[in-house]
Image (cartoon, rainbow, N blue to C red):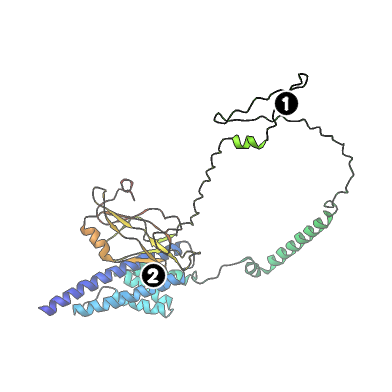
Amino acid sequence: MTTDLYSREQKLRKQAELQSLQVNLVTLRKQEVSYIAAAAAVPEFLANQIQEARREVRKVERELLTLRAETATIPGREIYWEGFEAELARDFERALKLYRQAAHDNYPDAEIAAQSVRHVIKGVKGKPAEIWIPRLARQPRQSFLWVGLIIIILLAIIILGYSNIGFNRAPTAVAVEMPTITLTFTPVTVIQIIPDTATPLPTAIPTETPTETPTATPIEVSSVAEASTEVAPTNTPTVAPTLRPAPRIIGPKDGLTWGDGAIVFEFEPYPALVNDELYCLRSLKGFDRTNTENWSYPRIGKHQPAIAIEPNVFRVARDQEIQCILWQAGIGKNSCDNLVSETTETRIIVISGRCQREKLKF
């Protein structure tokens, strides 16, 4: 009885692991489809991630078959993995045929694998971008015409350049007689500014000779500065630091409905990331059926552009009747508490039920 219980727990763990791997594989495949739809080469690191994920899926499937001790196999499984081996051996025609057979048996990933192999057969992967000179080399007659036209244009530019030399010469300096201007200075009367609190100046006392005009005591100009009111200091505005652009998100997609398993938050490699900077996933905030924030997950940062969150995190949120989770990302310096970039737009993950984005506040 104990052996059966242990075997059942192993099966449940392996089934959960297989489902998590399949969710990760589906996410990677969606990225691959986006590159294929744009008729661009699939990045090598993404292709390696897909192959590694498929190897893990095959390993867990074999372990599940061993635990079940059954003779029946998953429909299309053997055909799919024969196609996988053919693809690794670069026998793409045979791999495409086997993937189509596995897709007919509704094996997961078989259809998208066939699409990927068709893309490889068309020669899009690894094909260098065409440039103008090789295109002309494949059309020798037209290439001579183009080369001749280019030579004529260059000669015309050179001739026009020499002809414009005469027009670009510096003009001869001409002596111009400037009129003489005489400046007459008019004395300016100094006005004394005295505050109300200052001691009034004594009145000038005339001398004994009645014919002389009484003279006032000379006042220094510096008294004006001493009597002036205090100037209010000028407030210099504080310049906010310039934030770098937010990182671009590869996955998960906005509005993802979580069934089970881990979720990988993946970003495009940031071109100017230094050693002490991190890709930061801001706090995941969960909202219940009343659109009230009732759950959260702390900030987490990684040097690699991929942050994986274990399935137990989302299972806890589901057990607490959380329906929606909002999240953002950014670049942090030393820690995710010090963001040096703008944050991405707010994205949503649906846990259960329906989410009304306009009623949720991050």
Q: Position of residue 18 (x, y in %)?
A: 27, 71
155 relative to 184, above or below: below
125 relative to 224, above or below: below
Q: Residue at x 58, y 67 (%)?
A: 130
* 10 Å crowding of disc 1: few (<14), some (14-19), many (20+): few
The residue singled out by tag 1 in the image is 215
Q: Residue furthest top?
A: 210
Question: Viewed as shown, does residue 259 lie left or right of 183?
Answer: left
Among the 4 quarters of the image, the one containing residue 226:
top right
Q: Which is closer to the viewer, label 2 or label 1?
A: 1
Element assignment for label 2: helix
Q: Nearer the viewer, residue 299 or 137?
A: 299
Q: Position of residue 269 (x, y in %)?
A: 46, 65
The residue singled out by tag 2 in the image is 114
* 10 Å crowding of disc 2: few (<14), some (14-19), many (20+): many
Q: Say what amino acid the circle numbered 1 marks.
A: Thr
Q: Position of residue 10 (x, y in %)?
A: 20, 75
Element assignment for label 1: loop
Q: Nearer the viewer, residue 352 or 120?
A: 352
Among the 4 quarters of the image, the one containing residue 152:
bottom right
Q: Say what amino acid the circle numbered 2 marks.
A: Ala
47 relative to 168, above or below: below
Q: Nearer the viewer, residue 212 or 75?
A: 212
Q: Residue at x 19, y 77 (%)?
A: 68
Q: Which mark is residue 318?
A: none
